Amino acid sequence: MTVRLIDLTVPILEALAGGEVTSAEAALRVAVPPDFAAETGKWEFFASSGWPIHAVVRDDTIVGDAGFKGAPDSAGAVEIGYAILEPQRRRGYATAAVRLLLDIAAAEPNARLVRAVINPDNAASIAVVTRTGFTQHGEVMDPQEGRHLLFTRPPRI
């Protein structure tokens, strides 16, 4: 399973947020699936957040997105997030993307711990993080979404 991450730069995110799919495709050099392009609110948020986000690409097809929810905090913890498009799920793309994120975190000298916060009903995502070496370390409360499980691991094992 070979996937790669393509940086979604601010100009690309702004193009996606504005519905300018042709501009985003030209910058990415891959086709943007309609269900990826349709998440305009998500792209608008990331364009202004400063959080690094990437398109997850298999061959020349975007299959999802993955990234970090900010730089490592004062304790050296960095949180990952990922989403695979519905028609592309259950093919190992999320696992491959998480492994690539772990490689990026391992190269960051200030990152000492990688976190994943997952809804307890999301069995597929729990399987992805456990498959990639995370272990559950408690729970957190999301103000909008309620109880979530906290998984952690060092960037390199």
Image (cartoon, rainbow, N blue to C red):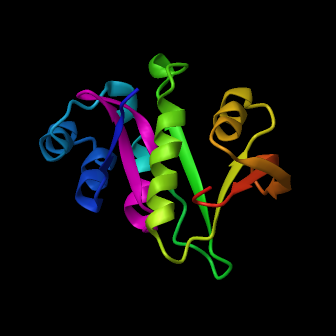
Q: What's the magenta region?
A: 44-67
Looking at the image, residue 99 sits to the left or right of residue 48; the answer is right
Tell me if I can see residue 90 in this picture. yes
**Most distant residue in the front direction:** 157
Residue name at image x 41 percent, y 54 percent: 53
Specify the quadrant that holds the C terminus.
Answer: bottom right
Residue name at image x 84 percent, y 55 percent: 137
Reply yes or no: does residue 64 show up in magenta. Answer: yes
User: Residue 11: x and y, percent?
Assistant: 23, 58
Indicate the quadrant where residue 120 lies. top right
Looking at the image, residue 47 sits to the left or right of residue 144; the answer is left
Specify the quadrant that holds the N terminus.
Answer: top left
From the viewer's perspective, is residue 157 above or below residue 5?
A: below
From the viewer's perspective, is residue 116 above or below residue 76?
A: above
Looking at the image, residue 21 sits to the left or right of residue 103; the answer is left
Tell me if I can see residue 67 in this picture. no
**Most distant residue in the left direction:** 26
Reply yes or no: does residue 32 show up in magenta. Answer: no
Looking at the image, residue 130 sits to the left or right of residue 7; the answer is right
User: Residue 37: x and y, percent?
Assistant: 34, 35
Residue name at image x 26 percent, y 32 percent: 32
**Tag count:** 0
User: Residue 41: x and y, percent?
Assistant: 45, 47
Which residue occupies the foreground of this view, 34 or 96? 96
Residue name at image x 48 percent, y 36 percent: 96
Indicate the quadrant where residue 21 lies. top left
User: Residue 68: x and y, percent?
Assistant: 51, 58
